Amino acid sequence: MVGVDMNKDVECTNESITAAIVRAALKSIPKNKGSGEVVSWWSDECKDAVRKRAFGLFQKMHNVQHLNYKMAPAVVRRTISKAKRDYWHKLCCSVGRSTPLENTFNDRS
């Protein structure tokens, strides 16, 4: 066992085992979630659309506000879809016959 003296009483052994588990967990479990996979088509416009959608969750919903709240996810979907389409179009226009394949999809700008 790791740093556990079996000649001690049960409480000390329990504390030693618990401390070893906590140390191992602190070393191996990430402390933050991370930012996830970076996608080339994500833009500030997409970020703003998602932020507006999230803000809508906190607003009280009345007639017109409720309608806007229901339409917000559609706006986000359209914004993200447009960003993907625009990026794909830009990528296709930049690729030529002499463009190396390994440089085509590795560009994350």
Image: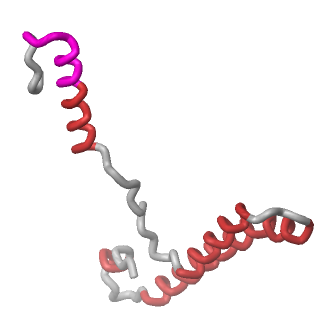
Q: Quadrant of the C terminus?
A: bottom left
Q: Residue at x 45, y 75 (%)?
A: 40
Q: How is the image coloured?
A: secondary structure
Where is residue 96 shown, x and y percent of the image?
40, 88
Of 85 and 4, the residue lying toward us: 4
From the viewer's perspective, is 43 left or right of 18? right
User: In the image, which residues are magenta?
Assistant: 7-17
Decide: is 16 above or below 56: above
Q: Residue at x 49, y 83 (%)?
A: 92
Where is residue 89 shown, x and y percent of the image?
54, 84
Of 67 and 41, the residue lying toward us: 67
Quadrant for residue 38, please give it.
Answer: bottom left
Quadrant for residue 16, please give it.
Answer: top left
Is residue 22 something one can see in this rendering?
A: yes
From the viewer's perspective, is 43 left or right of 16? right
From the viewer's perspective, is 17 left or right of 62? left
Where is residue 82 shown, x and y percent of the image?
63, 78
Is residue 81 something one can see in this rendering?
A: no
Of 108 and 75, the residue lying toward us: 75
Q: Residue at x 44, y 89 (%)?
A: 94
Where is residue 44 shown, x and y percent of the image?
54, 81
Magenta stretch holds residue 24: no
- Number of numbered discs present? 0
Magenta stretch holds residue 10: yes
Q: Residue at x 82, y 71 (%)?
A: 68
Quadrant for residue 86, please give it.
Answer: bottom right
Of 38 and 24, the residue lying toward us: 24
- The main secondary structure of the magenta stretch is helix
Decide: is 6 above or below 33: above
